[in-house]
Amino acid sequence: MKQKFDIISSTCVPLPLENVDTDQIIPARFLKATTREESFFGENLFRDWRYNPDGSLNKDFVLNDPTYSGEILVAGKNFGSGSSREHAAWAIAGYGFRVVISSFFADIHKNNELNNFVLPVVVSEEFLAELFKSIKENPKTIVEVDLPNQTVTNKATGKSEKFEINGYKKYCLMNALDDIDFLLENKEKTEAWENKANA
């Protein structure tokens, strides 16, 4: 779902695991779907961790713990490694996460998140460790992600870090535009350039 990004202040869901790959985010058996059905993919985010083999809820997994909630997923280093499946980003967005914070993302998955209106925020390992500590001590800890100023702030400690984002993707997120929307928004400019070039 396209939503304009500005400042997001939210509690967080902590996933302090490193090297979480796209098969763990959305198992391969769910890739037969060729259209993006957000509810379907959201329901199966981290499927093999959320559910036991008999289909019952794994109460030890963080998404099944009512203590934690929010629009921000705080994940360990090297998030989204493995195959390039865009379905992983569909699942994250479909569950309701608007931001994923980590100290490192696999490049293709990072771009897939951006293309699906999920903001990947890269922070230092020290800042990430502090976030995990704050959330563990108080699950109601608020994290503020300010896209216009490209800052992320741990409200529990007051500490902030800057994060990088491609200027084009930043514009698209702030205006709820996908690549096609952007082209349509600039249709007149494109046509004017073509007319000038062909004159």
Image: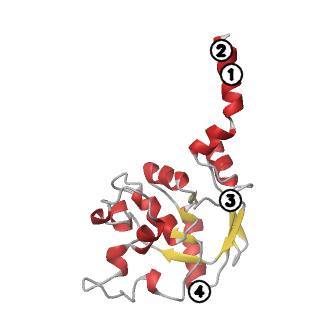
**Residue kind at label 1, given as amino acid type:** Trp
> On the image, numbered disc 3 is attached to which residue?
5
**Residue kind at label 4, given as amino acid type:** Glu
Quick check: can you spot residue 148? yes
Numbered disc in front, either 2 or 3:
2
Residue 4 in picture, x, y percent from top left: 68, 58
N-terminal label among 2 and 4: 4
Numbered disc in front, either 4 or 1:
1
N-terminal label among 3 and 4: 3
**Residue kind at label 3, given as amino acid type:** Phe
> On the image, numbered disc 1 is attached to which residue?
193
| Mark 3 crowdedness (10 Å alpha carbons): few <14, some 14-19, many ≥20 | many
> On the image, numbered disc 4 is attached to which residue?
137
Residues marked 3 and 4 touching at CB (< 8 Å): no
Q: CA distance from mark 4 to mark 1?
A: 56 Å
> On the image, numbered disc 2 is attached to which residue?
197
- Name the side, left or right, on which 48 lies relative to 137: left
Residue 158 in picture, x, y percent from top left: 73, 72
Q: CA distance from mark 2 to mark 3?
A: 35 Å
Could you tell me which residue is drawn at 59 percent across and 85 percent down?
A: 139
Could you tell me which residue is drawn at 27 percent across and 65 percent down?
A: 29
N-terminal label among 4 and 1: 4
- Secondary structure found at label 4: helix
Quick check: can you spot residue 78? no
Could you tell me which residue is drawn at 47 percent across and 87 percent down?
A: 65
Residue 152 in picture, x, y percent from top left: 67, 64
Residues marked 1 and 2 touching at CB (< 8 Å): yes
| Mark 1 crowdedness (10 Å alpha carbons): few <14, some 14-19, many ≥20 | few
The answer to which of 14 and 176 lies nearer the viewer is: 176
Residues marked 2 and 4 touching at CB (< 8 Å): no
